[in-house]
Amino acid sequence: MSESSLPAAHQQRSLQQKRIVPPNPEPVIVIDGVTKRFGDFTAVDDVSLTIDRGELFSLLGGSGCGKTTLLRMLAGFETPTKGRILIDGQDMTDVPPYARPVNMMFQSYALFPHMTVEQNIAFGLKQDGMARDAIRARVAEMLDMVELSALGPRKPHQLSGGQRQRVALARALAKRPKVLLLDEPLGALDKKLRERTQLELVNLQCQLGITFVVVTHDQEEAMTMSDRVAIMNQGRILQVDSPHAMYEFPGTRFVAEFFGSINAFEGTIAEDGLTHAVISCPDLDAPVYVNHSVPGYEGSTVWAALRPEKITLSKQPPADPARNVARGVVEDIVYLGGDSTYLVRLESGRRIRVALQNLTRAAEPEVTWDDAVWVSWRPENVVVLTS
Amino acid sequence: MIARAGQWVTEVLQAGGRRLVIAVPFVWLLLFFLAPFAIVAKISLAEFRVGVPPYTPLFEIVEGAWLHIRATLGNYAYLIDDPLYVAAYLSSVKIAAVSTVFALLIGYPMAYGIARSAQPWRNVLLLAVMLPFWTSFLIRVYAWIGILRSNGLLNNFLLWLGVIDEPLVLLNTDLAVYIGIVYSYLPFMILPLYATLEKMDLSLLEAAQDLGCRPWKAFVTVTLPLSLPGIIAGSMLVFIPAVGEFVIPDLLGGPSTLMIGKVLWSEFFNNRDWPVASAVAIAMLVLLVAPIVFFQRYRMRQDEKAREAAL
Amino acid sequence: MKSVSRSPFLITMLAFGFAFLYLPILLLILYSFNESRLVTVWGGFSVKWYAELFQDAQILGAAKISLTVAAITATLATALGTLAGLVLVRFGRFRGRTLFSGMITAPLVMPEVVTGLSILLLFVALEQLIGWPAGRGVTTITIAHVTFTMAYVAIIVQSRLTQLDGSMEEAAMDLGARPAKAFLLVTLPIIAPALVSGWLLAFTLSLDDLVIASFAAGPDSTTLPMVVFSSVRLGVSPKINALATLLVLGATIIIIGAAWFMHRQDRDRDRAVARAMAEQKDRE
C-alpha cells in the first residue's frame, strides 16, 4: 500500500502511532446483548461490544442509528430493555446515573447557566463530599489542563463556543471517571476549531489514559481520533475495527460508503482461485483481476469496490489494457486544493470517482473537461464485497 | 428632480409614519393612564367638602391676582392616625403574601407536571389551566359562596361524611379570602412558572445526575434556581393585584376582614370622601411601587433575552 | 426523564390542582339545573331558572350594554395594543421608551380599585375643564376598558413579534415593499392569530370587569357584572347560577374552538410539510 495515495484526513492518524497501547488489552466496558425499544421502535438491536481500558472508541453512524441511545445507556439515562452492561467488571444495568463511575460530556455541553466556570467544574466533586481544599486544588488543576485558568469566575454565557466546550470537558473529567462519554463533542464548533480540538482531545486522552467513548456522525472525526470505530446502522453494529482496517478492509458496501467514498461495481465471479480471482462486471469493459482469494464461488454475485484515490487516470492506454481498465470521458472536476476529484463517465454510462493529488502548480491540469481517458487500478487495490 | 422630490416626500412621510405609530398608543396611555395618577395625587392633597365635585380646589385665584395654593397633608395624617388604615394595609399585605405562598406551593408542582408531560397532553393541560382565566372572575368567586356557606355544599358533604357534627363557619372568614385569592390567581402563578420550566434544557438535569446528584438534589441545585425568574414573575402577578383586591374580601370575607381595596371602595362609594380615597390609593401605590418596579425590570430583562435569542 | 411525568406526587398534585380549579365551576353549573330555589338541596332537574333569566329585563339590558362595551373595547384595544407591541419590538430606542414600556406593563398588575378611581377622577377633571365627557356612561367605561386591556393585547402581540423572523419583513422591503406595506402584507397575516387572541382576551376582560366599570359608569350604564355583583351580595340565587353557566359555556366554546382551529392549522401545515418532503424524497 502506498502511503502517498491516502487521503489527507487519513494521514493525520500518524498521531495514534505515538500512543502507548497497553500490551494486554483489558476490557473496561462490556455490552452484552443489549436491546432498547421505545414502544414499537427498536433503537438498539442486540448489541454486544467490548471496549478496552485506555481506548479512544468511536460510535459512528447517521442520525437515528442508535449510537446516542447506546451512549445514554452507558451513562444510565436509559435502561436496556434486554441485556447487560458491565463497567469495570460490575453490572451497571440497573445502577442510576448518579452512582456510575462514568461521566458524560453533553452535546449541548449542559453547563449550568447559574453557576460560574469554577462552580460548574466543582459540582461533581461537591456531590462526592470532597473536602473544600481538595476541590479547590482539583478545579485549579482542571482549569489549567484546559488552559482556562483566567476564566474561572465567569459565567457560561460569557464564554466563546470553544471555551464552553473545554469547560464541559473539564467538568466531566474532574471526578476522574473510569470512562468519559462524549456525545458529539465537536458538533457545535466551526471547522477550523474542530480540527484543532480533535488533536487536543486525542492528546489529552493519551495523557490521562482514561477510556473515551465518542459518539459522532462525522466519519472524518472518527477516523482522525479513534483507536477503534464501531459503525452502527438501524440499531445494529455493522463492523468494529481500527480506522485503517475499516477504510482498507470494509466488510460491506454500507461500511465502505459510510467510511470514505467508494466506487462499487456489481458483477459475478468468473474465475475463483486460491491466489487470484476474476470478476466480470457489466459496467466495466474489461474483467477485474484480483490477486487474492475472494469470498464466494464461481457465478456468485459480488461487488468490486475501488477507493477513488486508488485509481489512476491517463490519456494514454495503460500497460495492460486487457484487465482492470475502463475508458471514459471526464465529465466534471471538483477542485479541492490539495487534490481534485474527477467524475469520469464510462462507456457503459456509469460514473466513476477518481481522486488525484495536485502535485504541481500548473495553470491547466493535464487532464481536463471532456478529455477521453483511461482509468486503471492495481489488482491488490480491489475490495471484493458480498453485500 | 421630480423623482428626488418624490423620494423626499416619501421619506418625510415615513419618518412621520414612524412618529405617528409611536404617538397614538403613547398619547392614549399618557392621557388615560399616567395623567389620572397626577390627578389622584392632586386630590389627595385637597379637602373634603359637600358639593360637586366633593373636594376643594387646589389652586384658587383669590382677590383677582393672588394664586392661592391650598394643599394639605391632612388626609395622609388621617391615614396614619386612624388605626383602621394602618391595620388594613398590614392585613392586605399579609393576606396577599400568604395567598401567594399557597399559590406557589400548589402552582409549582402543577407547572412542573405540565412542563414534563408528553406533548399532546401538555397542550391540553395548559389550555385547562388557562380556561378558568377566560371565564368570569366574579362568577368564579361567587361559586365559592355556594360551597362555603354554613348550609353550603362543603358543610353538607362533611356532615354527610360524619367528620363534623355541626356546620363550620367558613364563609365570611379570612380563610375564605385565602381560598378565593389562591383560586382566582392560580393560573397567573402557573403560566410564568410553566414558561421557565418548559424552556429549561433537560440535559442540565441529566448532567447534574451524571455528576452524582440524586434526582431531588438535582431539582434543588439546578431546577429550582433556574426557575427563579418564573417564581418571581408568578408571585408578583399574584401578590400585587391581591393586595388591592376588592371583590374577594367583599364577597367571601367577613366584617373583620380588613383589606385596603375594600377600604378604598367604601371611602369612595359609601362615605363619598374622594380626597381620603385618593390618599388611600396613593399610599397603596407607594406600598406597591417596589414590587411593581421589580416586576417591570424582570419583564424588560425577559424582553431583552427574547430579543437576543431571536437575533 | 420520561419517568418524571409518571411521578405519583406530580400526578396527585395535578389531579388535586385541576379539581380545585374546576370543581366549583362544575357545581355551579350543576345547581343551575336545580328545581329547588334552595341552592343546597337538589330538587330535581329543571331549566326554569334559564326561562326566568331571559325574562329579567334588568339583566338583559345590562348584558346588552356589557356586550356593546366589550365589542368596542376589544376592537380599539386590539388596534392600539398592536401598535404598542410593534413599537416595543421593532422601533428600537426612542425618547420615552422606558416610560412607554412601563405604561404597557403597569396596568397588568395595577390594583383595579386604583385604576378605577384614577380614571374616574380624570373624567371628572376633564368635565370641569372642557365640558367633556358630559356625565359618565358607555363612553367612559369603554375608554377605561381600552386603557387597561390594550396592555394585554400589546404583551401578546409583542411576544408573537419577538418570535417572528425579522428578515421576512426585510425580504418584503428588498422586493420593493415600503415598510408600512411590508407590515400589512407580510407581518400582519403572520401575527393574525395573536390579534385574534388579543381581541378575545380584551373582550373577555371587558365583559368581566366589575371594579373599573363601577367607577367609570354613570346611572344609566349598569353593566352585567354590576348587576350580578349587587345580586350576589344578597346571597346565592339560582338565576345567577344559570347566567354563570351560560357565560362559562360561551367562554369555553370560544376558547376550545379557537384552540382547536389553531391546532388544526398547525396540523395541516405539518402534514403539508411532511407531504412535500415525501415528494422530494420520491423524486430523489
Image (tube, coloured by chain):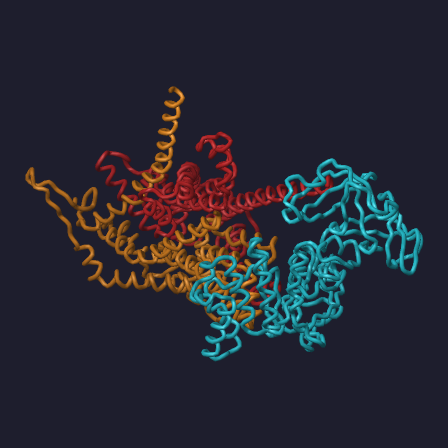
Q: Would residue C25 be visible to someone looking at this image?
A: yes
Q: In this view, does C200 lie to the left or right of A253?
A: left
What colour denotes chain C? red
The x and y percentages for residue C11 are 58, 64
Q: In this view, does B278 lie to the left or right of B154?
A: left
**Residue furthest toward the left?**
B63
On screen, residue B65 above or below A16: above
Task: From the top left corner, tell me how far across and down residue A235 is, in percent.
Answer: 73, 60
Q: Which colour is chain A painted?
A: cyan
Q: Quadrant of residue C127?
A: top left
Visible residue check, residue B150: no
Q: In the picture shown, does residue A87 fall above or below B286?
A: below
The x and y percentages for residue A137 are 47, 76
Residue for point 67% across, 48% down: A359
Q: Position of residue A132 (x, y in %)?
A: 45, 78
Indicate the quadrant containing the N terminus of chain B: top left, top right, bottom left or bottom right: top left
Residue at the far top in the pictured view: B2
Task: Give the farthest residue toward the bottom.
Answer: A131
B124 or A99, which is in the foreground? A99
Q: Which chain is orange?
A: B
Q: Which residue is drawn at 10% across and 40% down?
A: B61
Location of residue A111 with respect to C136 vertically, above or below: below
> What is the tally of numbered marks visible in this picture?
0
The answer to which of C272 and A280 lies nearer the viewer is A280
Left or right of A293, for residue A129: left
